[in-house]
Amino acid sequence: MEHATLSGAARAAIEAIQETSGYLWSKGWAERNAGNITHNLTEIWDPAIGAQGPLVAYPGIPAEAEGLVLFMTGTGKRLRELRDPGTAGAVVRFHPAQGGYRILWGGAGDPGYKITSEAPSHLRLHLEMVKRGSPFRCAVHTHPLALIVLSHHPELGRDEALLTRSIWQMVPEVRAFVPRGVGIVPYTMPGSDELGEKTCEVLLKRDVAIWSMHGATALGQDALEAFDFIDVADKGARLLLDCWAAGFNPVGTRRSEMEELARVFGLPGDDFGL
């Protein structure tokens, strides 16, 4: 896809999404049309780019989203198709007062193009990040296999403190690069406002929100940073599952060792009470 019409910053953000989508597909985390990626471009979007297309009806957009410009993957689109981001994705501007949004770029000129069905969750996340002055502008939702398996565990899947401790202990990098741990969103109907609200609550204090028996979501300054949080957390989960598959419970790093790691590298404190 030729990006000559995009500003440098917007082009870089979309290229990061393009690169990340390839990683998600190669890991087996993006079967069929699973997963979605959105990036808030409002601050870097050139208003001269993109004709004001027809209004696409989309009821229920929060009033504070007026003028919000997001790159969003499309409903029914496959993440592997983001090798051409203007086909599987689009840049849209929201107009809640008019009851919908307009496509500014992408969508492959498809008059039937519609944004991801998880748009309510993503909208809430982006609005909350702006409200709180967070530098995070990208949200990645995918289906990491090991984390989904652990979400089915009768104990770990219901106890975010136990789950976080269990994957932190597997290798120092998990404690270092997922320093706020993982939170659990109990199974909630995909695409619902309720799922968005619960995900927001979790990601205000955790690096990864596990959607129980569904997938995981993380935020970052770009798609690659958001992907890193999920990737590292899933590594800890895979190592734990490998130990169990080999027939033993892992020894794990001691609490004192993790406390030392946090102190030396200036990591956030453990607020789980572990």
Image (cartoon, rainbow, N blue to C red):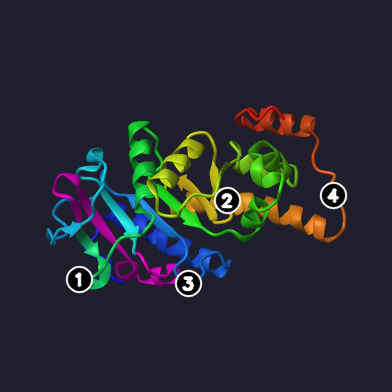
Q: Position of residue 271 (x, y in %)?
A: 63, 28
N-terminal label among 1 and 4? 1
Structural crowding at the residue carrying mark 4, measured as other residues with C-alpha within 10 Å and reported as few (<14), some (14–19) or many (≥20): few
4 and 3 marks in contact (CB < 8 Å): no
Q: Which residue corresponds to mark 3?
A: 32
168 lies above or below 89: above
Structural crowding at the residue carrying mark 2, measured as other residues with C-alpha within 10 Å and reported as few (<14), some (14–19) or many (≥20): many
- Name the side, left or right, on which 237 lies relative to 92: right
Q: Position of residue 121 (x, y in %)?
A: 39, 48
4 and 2 marks in contact (CB < 8 Å): no
Residue 212 numbered mark, or none: 2
- Name the side, left or right, on which 151 lies relative to 140: right
N-terminal label among 4 and 2? 2
Residue 249 numbered mark, or none: 4
Question: CA separation, marks 4 and 2?
Answer: 23 Å
N-terminal label among 4 and 3? 3
Question: CA separation, marks 1 and 3?
Answer: 22 Å
Q: Position of residue 91 (x, y in %)?
A: 26, 58
N-terminal label among 1 and 3? 3
